[in-house]
Amino acid sequence: MKKPKIHQRANQFLKKGSGNYLKLRNVYHKLRIMRFSLGYKLSRFVNWGMNESLLHFIWKNRLLEAGDWRTTEGQTIRVFQTGQHNHHAGPDFNEALLGIGLERWMGSVEIHWYAKEWWQHGHQNDAAYNNVILHVVWEGTQPAQRADGSLIPTFELKNWVAQEMLLRYESLQFQNNPIPCSRLLRSEDAQLFGPMLDRAGVERLEHRVSAMEQQLIANKGDWEQAFWVWLAGVYGLKVNREPMEALAQSVPVHLLLKYQQDLMAVEALLFGQAGFLEQPTEEAYLKDLKQQYQYLRQKHRLKPHYAAAWRFLRMRPGGFPTRRIAQLATLVHQNLPLFQKMRSQHTIKTIMPLLLQPPSTYWQHHYRPGDNGKGKSGVPSQAMAEVWIINALVPAVFLYGKLQHQPEEQEKAINWLEELRAEENNVLHLYAPLGVKPANALQSQGIIELYKHYCSEQRCLDCSVGCKLLTRKQTKHAKTG
């Protein structure tokens, strides 16, 4: 049996998250600081803190110290346009405008950590790289070559980047705080977060839309059915989302439309299909509900779900799935077709009354079938209604506008988020000590997106706040012609 190669054994030893990894990472961080402070060169085999994304950031923002920029062959370099950042296959930047020597060139720029990577990646045989006019590298003098054999000038960055910025980048990458930039922030920096939160809020909305689009496809383009299933899932929150969605699938909108005017029939369909009418009872309401369900079940050949799928543990009684089903029944009874009616509203003020309706009399006093009857009114709280709007209605309307080519609908969905109050959750509490206070629900959603997909993944170079912090008080940029 062959022994694993040394790098495989090293990877096992340094498995991310292990004690060995964390200890060695901290030692490495100190060595990195020594490298930049003293000008020493650390072995290229432990090049964790820096990557091509940083080099792209430096080039794109022209974060180079002023001076006589030259290629490794000695030709002068002037940058008129860094080019369009390409996130797909091919060179890293397109349509760059450069002065190299006595000539002006327009074409692509390819960026690598080491000059030899041009050859390692096989670009010398790829016609897609024939338009490259400059090879930008951190270090290395090995010349690059096009497929036709012509040479490409190389520009080495390592002597032209401010050490202060590199140290800040290292600090961000090796920060144990859940918010990597927290130690670099000043008291007045809270204002930097506003535009980023707006942008991240829209990004989070687009992620939600993607999931809802799959629901629409699964329901063959039926907006009312797709929205009904999505809304039911949101009513169940995280704990009971799946059984709620399954319930909505088993009682489709076209069936509810037949019995919309009869609240008892709607409740019989939903509670019966949810499996909550299986137990024997002496209560008149429950007996009538069960009898009506038996009739509807046989008539429409329905198959109920098992009540065991529902979760009640560690929940407040007001959030029990039975209470949510009763609230959904009232919503359906009063508002079908649901999506059409809710989408036609123009402001949050007109949407709220649709959601803040009390359930039927029995469910105003009960949390579960057959309990002691000491429940409260059963009217949803405004905070809960806002959760339903944020997580169901807003994404649905945004998606509708996107697929129907109606940008005004998308704008309306975003405006609704701006009308709603900022939510309260644990993620927001992480940013509060930094002075970051979301102004509305769009920004509170943005904080969640920022934490999950930027801070937690250390995507500081993609965050406008991180970019501001990295470029603050840098050496003046060179003139660009």
Image: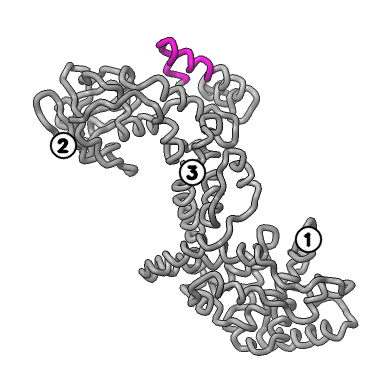
Q: Is residue 287 left or right of residue 70?
A: right
Residue 185's spot in the image, x, y percent?
52, 33
**Mark 2 or 3, closer to the camera:** 3
- Residue depicted at 25% across the width and 35% down the height: 82
The three-letter code of the residue at mark 3 reads Phe
Q: Quadrant of the C terminus?
A: top left
Disc 2 residue type? Answer: Met
Give the mark nearer the N terminus: 2 vs 3: 2
- Name the residue nearer the viewer: 118 or 344: 344
The answer to whether residue 173 is magenta is: no
Q: Is residue 126 visible?
A: no
Q: Quick one: quadrant of the N terminus?
A: top right
**How busy is the neighbourhood of tag 2: few (under 14 within 10 Å), some, or many (20 plus)?**
some
Residue at x 53%, y 16% (from the top left corner): 30
Mark positioned earlier in the residue sequence (1 or 2) = 2
* Front-most of residues 8 and 84: 84
Quick one: SS at disc 2? strand
Residue 299 shown left or right of residue 24 in the figure: right
Alpha-carbon distance for marks 3 and 1?
34 Å
Question: Foreground: 62 or 215?
Answer: 62
Magenta region: 28-46
Residue 45 as seen in the image, left or right of residue 150: right
Find disc 3 in the rendering and name its residue: 193
Q: Position of residue 264 (x, y in %)?
A: 73, 86
Residue kind at label 1, given as amino acid type: Arg
Label 1 CA crowd tier, 10 Å (few <14, some 14–19, many 20+): few
**Which residue is under mark 1?**
316
The label number, if any, that marks residue 106 in the structure image: 2
